[in-house]
Image (tube, rainbow, N blue to C red):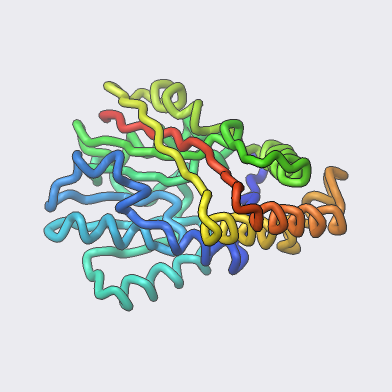
Amino acid sequence: MPHEVYTHSHDKVVVDAHGRRTADEAAAFVRPRIRPYMRILDAGCGPGSITCGLARWVPDGEVVGVDVEASVLEHARDRAIAESVDNVSFQVADVYDLTVPDDSFDIVYAHQLLQHLGRPVEALGEFLRVLKPGGCVAVRDADYGTMTHYPNDARVVRLFEIYAQVARVNRGEPDAGRRLLSWVRAAGFSSPVYTTSSWQFATPEGRTWWADLWAGRIVVPKYVKRVEELGVSTADELAELGAGFRDWATNPDGVFTFVNGEVVARA
């Protein structure tokens, strides 16, 4: 089986950015279905910021966060302790082979995970296995093909062209957002509901944060090595593109936006 590569890496710049995510924003599309007593699995939980938020929504229940990367779960555990969230736990796990019994959870939630998997339908099938009858899956992924910005800057366009090419070689799908419905249906879920939400960066602070994040991501040594191995770009070009994105972010007219696809479906 070909090895999968997490294109973003688990470098500090990435983990810190993921730690800013909240359940209030990232899981709003499934919140109406959550009840205080439920058991929730957060697949690909990263540093646990969303996981802890989910746990606060189920004070009489439990949330289990799983991730393939052990180091990032240390951040998640530290967060749970710092925020006094005691109905959450974290474990290293492979989403294709979860070490939990059938019919264990009321909800399986996954944020920005499926885009990085070479076998998303297979992972969804594993989510189906661990869900209780009548439980639901809730998945959300970006659609990079919807990314647009103004004023147009060729350096920003090139940065994301390179990323999409590398991600696909790594067996991911950057345009996952538009595919979620088909993947969920193929995995055997019923009554799927598809929605979208957008992210936008149009303030000086928002543009700066977004540009700094990507300028940092694309010079992470593992990413640079992968790009150069593939002959897609060079370290020098990546550094120039990151500087270009930061330059674009200083434009007071600047807007960057894209769509996230979301699906909630029944087991």
Residue 132, by quadrant, is: top left
Residue 92, by quadrant, is: bottom left
Placement of 219 over or under 78, stated as above or below: above
Where's residue 22, x and y in %? Answer: 36, 57
Task: Tell how many labels.
Answer: 0
Q: Is residue 7 visible?
A: yes
177 with respect to 149 (left or right) = left
Residue at 27% x, 39% y: name it.
131
Where's residue 173, x and y in %? Answer: 60, 35
171 with respect to 66 (left or right) = right
Residue at 27% x, 30% y: name it.
267
Residue 115, by quadrant, is: top right
Where's residue 54, x and y in %? Answer: 27, 55
Q: Where does the N terminus fall, quadrant-wise?
A: top right
119 with respect to 133 (left or right) = right
Residue at 29% x, 22% y: name it.
190
Q: Is residue 174 visible?
A: no
Residue at 69% x, 42% y: name it.
160
Placement of 121 over or under 25, stated as above or below: above
